[in-house]
Amino acid sequence: MQGNRQPRVRSGNQPHPAPAMKPAGRGAWAHSRAALDRLEKLLRCSRCTNILREPVCLGGCEHIFCSNCVSDCIGSECPVCYTPAWIQDVKINRQLDSMIQLCSKLQNLLHDTDLSGVKACLQSKECEQEEKYEIPEGPQKSRLNREQLLPKLFDGCYFYLGGTFKHHPKDNLIKLVAAGGGQILIRKPKPDSDVTQTINTVAYHAKPDSDQRFCTQYIIYEDLSNHRPERVRQGKVWMAPSSWFIDCVMSFELLPLDN
């Protein structure tokens, strides 16, 4: 009967069984590290040969440099191939910068240490308990804070981002504020305003014995730029550099601010 016929397969098109997947072991681990090492070599500055920092393309050629390495070449020529480097052609490659940061994270993840959970999983061929290999300090404190249903890092805090941000893009800072439970201020807070100083919120994660727990509004500026705004530290309004904000996120703590 027709229903009992075996399907005919043309010669040369007969399906083959899928190859068995080999468990990831030491060979896969070494292959992954070698691939990342090759990628890292491609992400080095054409002048200082270090990993690119704020990668810049001069426009007229394909050489890529750290922004600081070619600050003296803008308006003259490429230091490698001597192609004219016009100032309007100089652009920071944000996509490449994101790739460099991702590569750095992967390198740390695959680093050959006894604390590497990825390595342990590859060697045992089983899922290991994550807590044994988690990064201490900030990441661990963040996990425990969430498990205990405590307020987020920036609970009760408001942030005004003043000026331009190049090293820490403003969009990234806004996302970190939102993820940490803080709020963004559209207008710059006025320290001498009665409305500002009568806000009753308290920063939960500030040290309980410091006057910083009463500070709820931060004016954030980029300290890596040449711009230095007038210092503000009055009541509930304090000024803080963007590097302090990033350090707070990394350590999961409202760190003390220098006087």
Image (cartoon, rainbow, N blue to C red):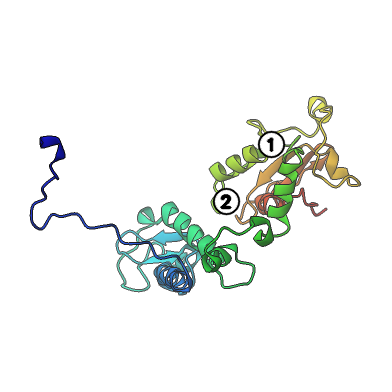
Tell me the CA gap for discs 1 and 2.
18 Å
Q: Is residue 94 left or right of residue 121?
A: left
Task: State the residue at coordinates (75%, 44%).
Answer: 145
Taking the view exactly as shown, the residue that stands out farthest to the right is: 209
Lower sequence index among marks 1 and 2? 2
Q: Position of residue 2 (x, y in %)?
A: 10, 36
**How many numbered callouts?**
2
Q: Position of residue 21 (x, y in %)?
A: 38, 62
Q: Is residue 185 left or right of residue 25?
A: right
**Does the rendering let one see residue 153?**
no
Q: Which residue is label 2 attached to?
A: 168
Q: Return the residue nearer the eye: 45 or 4.
A: 4
Q: Return the residue nearer the eye: 14 or 26.
A: 14
Considering only vertical position in the picture, is 209 above or below 56?
A: above
**Does the rendering let one see residue 224?**
yes
Q: Return the residue nearer the eye: 164 or 7.
A: 7
Determine the secondary structure under disc 1.
loop
Taking the view exactly as shown, the residue that stands out farthest to the top is: 195
Task: State the residue at coordinates (77%, 51%).
Answer: 255
Q: Return the residue nearer the eye: 150 or 156.
A: 150
Determine the secondary structure under disc 2.
loop
Considering only vertical position in the picture, is 222 above or below 234?
A: below
Task: State the residue at coordinates (68%, 47%).
Answer: 229
Considering only vertical position in the picture, is 65 above or below 243?
A: below
* Disc 2 residue crowd, few under 14, some 14–19, many 20+, Cα 10 Å: some
Q: Which residue is label 1 attached to?
A: 182
Q: Quadrant of the N terminus?
A: top left
Mark 1 residue type? Gly
Q: Position of residue 60 (x, y in %)?
A: 30, 61
Q: Is residue 257 left or right of residue 74?
A: right
